[in-house]
Image: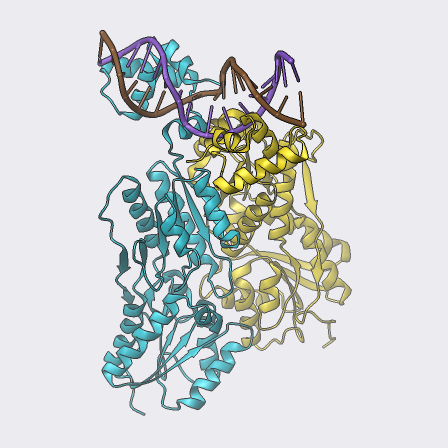
Chain colours: A cyan, B yellow, C purple, D brown
Amino acid sequence: MVKITDVARHAGVSPSTVSYALSGKRPISEETRRRVEEAIRELGYRPHAGARALASSKSNVLALVVPLRAGIHVPVVMRFAVSVVTTARGYDHDVLLLTQEEGEEGLRRVADTALVDALILMDVQLHDPRLPLLRALERPSVMIGFPASSEGLTCIDLDFKAAGEACVDHLAQLGHQVVALVGSPPEVYVRQTAFAQRVVQGFTAAADRHGLASSVHPCEAGPGDARRVAERLLREQPALTGVVVHNEPLLEPLIDAFEKLGLRVPGDLSVTAICPDELAESARVPVTSVALPSAEVGERAVELLMRKLAGDTDVPQATLLAPRLTERASTARRTIA
Amino acid sequence: MVKITDVARHAGVSPSTVSYALSGKRPISEETRRRVEEAIRELGYRPHAGARALASSKSNVLALVVPLRAGIHVPVVMRFAVSVVTTARGYDHDVLLLTQEEGEEGLRRVADTALVDALILMDVQLHDPRLPLLRALERPSVMIGFPASSEGLTCIDLDFKAAGEACVDHLAQLGHQVVALVGSPPEVYVRQTAFAQRVVQGFTAAADRHGLASSVHPCEAGPGDARRVAERLLREQPALTGVVVHNEPLLEPLIDAFEKLGLRVPGDLSVTAICPDELAESARVPVTSVALPSAEVGERAVELLMRKLAGDTDVPQATLLAPRLTERASTARRTIA
DNA sequence: GTGAAAGCGCTAACAC
DNA sequence: GTGTTAGCGCTTTCAC
């Protein structure tokens, strides 16, 4: 293995000069820099990550904790992870993948052994058991999602309340007066994941504000569920003409189910969703939707973390990304029957 | 930060004793071990990963390179990644996530800096440009998928040829005489990913062996594609009664399309697939399928890598997992019209 | 603008 | 069964 002393000897300088040439932490003469760079190239030198981490107390690795649980849309997690890795590389950092399953012990392990410099957590719950640990940890972290209190933490997510409102506002503008929210599976609410509840809040608040009749339905997304949900909605709200779907796997089956029940989308029923753009675009009937900006969230999360690592003290505790609604073929002005 | 010398002092032993107590690399008396463990617990000691890597030249980290490209089913990648992380943890290793995008330079970087001890690569192509690098690298690797020549490498995957055969065998047993393969998107074949071609080989060979009429159709999986494919199949092979689908996103839409064209599954048409069990089970008509065992492949890949890291020299170059076909509701005996 | 040298915290000979 | 100690390869003072 070629080491820094080899490079130094080859370039006729001291090891520290090589180190400084690499880090840019002190001025190096043009000529010296050139010689060092050439030596590095000729010898194919790569600094040893462990030695570097030991001497500098920086591993240049971030931990990313991904959820595994039911009710979480896998492509969103994956897109997010890829975005984190890509952005981190832009800051010369790598990403260590942890599963939620490892729990607090896993976080403590990678943080305390100095394997990672900082952490990104997905799928944060209202009363997430990891919160006290994160506050106590000597390493910065960023959470995707909002707990009950983000005091002393850094959180980022789509503004789900505003997203719920945006969907209803859109339906209201189109003249719809009876709307329903088809939400995430019940377990998502039960375990108090904030984003699901925020959508409900926004949905309900906007419906009330516009004077619309509204109802909320947490839904599973198994084989026959779409049909059952569609039937129930129509039974309970016969005048229903606007639906907001916040449940990725149910979106397409639900539209199919409505059509099989004789309702045209958007002729009889307007459907909007909160989901990744890809899903909304590729549906048989492209769906008007508020985008779930996984890639942007990942990018922003890394940026926040880098600021914290750089010692920036006024990094915002809460970052809410404004919803972006894209109109597609699934919504239309209400036709008076 | 509490270090090994702190623990040693607190336990009244030498640092090396603490180190050996931790690694088990030499016998420690019962009494000493107890004192060391207590000191570790009381002080909350965690060995510094970088220092360890430097002194032992082992980082206990594996690199996992995931693909991003079109035609790759995301949930499969994610399941695989989770399985790798979970299995690696069982061997006291962590996992660094790399994207295919980083290319050979990324592999070289993490290998040469000793950031990782070994590598796992997904989505290997027949003439993968990374092959020479992997052979040259001083660190062991395992590939998911098979290149044209696996000489000097370690590869593992589902036996896709046998999987294609198993599907046809099953259809043949049920009396079907005209079968079609609905394959992955054309770009998957163009870039010569071996698994897609192996399915075709197995499918064709088995069809020939059984004397069945057969045809192969690489397919996109966009919005209207299912319908178009269904129509084309029926046009070109009016006597078609058996279909093998090797294209996850197209599976359900395709069945829907067939039914909309007036064909009952499995009444008029039997459908089998090569896909994750979850997908096959949760379809509206549960699909007879050969499982894509992502979790098992991930687990086995890590195990192979651990054997190589342990110095085992007769690790098999090629591991082909035998297909497992599960009968579900989508296939039935051919009814003579 | 550059060099010398003292660690960073751990492992693994080598000694006993 | 345990202790001593010389590194592992790098960063970063301190000195010039």
Is any part of residue A160 visible from this angle?
A: yes
Quadrant that contains the C terminus of chain B: bottom right
Counting every numbered tag in the picture gives 0
Task: Please provide percent x and percent y for residue A270.
Answer: 34, 79
Q: Nearer the viewer, residue A193 or B190?
A: A193
Q: Is residue B221 above or below residue A298?
A: below
Residue at image location 42% in from the left, 50% down from the top: A81
Q: Nearer the viewer, residue B101 or A143?
A: A143
Determine which quarter of the picture holds residue B27. Answer: top right
Task: Please provide percent x and percent y for residue B57.
Answer: 53, 26
Residue at image location 60% in from the left, 52% down from the top: B294
Task: Please provide percent x and percent y for residue A237.
Answer: 39, 89
Task: Please provide percent x and percent y for residue A145.
Answer: 36, 60
| Left or right: where C12 falls relative to A109 | right
Q: Nearer the viewer, residue A282 or A3?
A: A3
Determine which quarter of the picture holds residue A206. Answer: bottom left
Q: Is residue B332 above or below residue A278?
A: below
Quadrant that contains the N terminus of chain B: top left
Is any part of residue B137 visible from this angle?
A: no
Q: Is residue B115 above or below residue B178?
A: above
Residue at image location 31% in from the left, 59% down from the top: A150
Determine which quarter of the picture holds residue B170. Answer: bottom right
Q: Is residue A317 above or below residue A11?
A: below
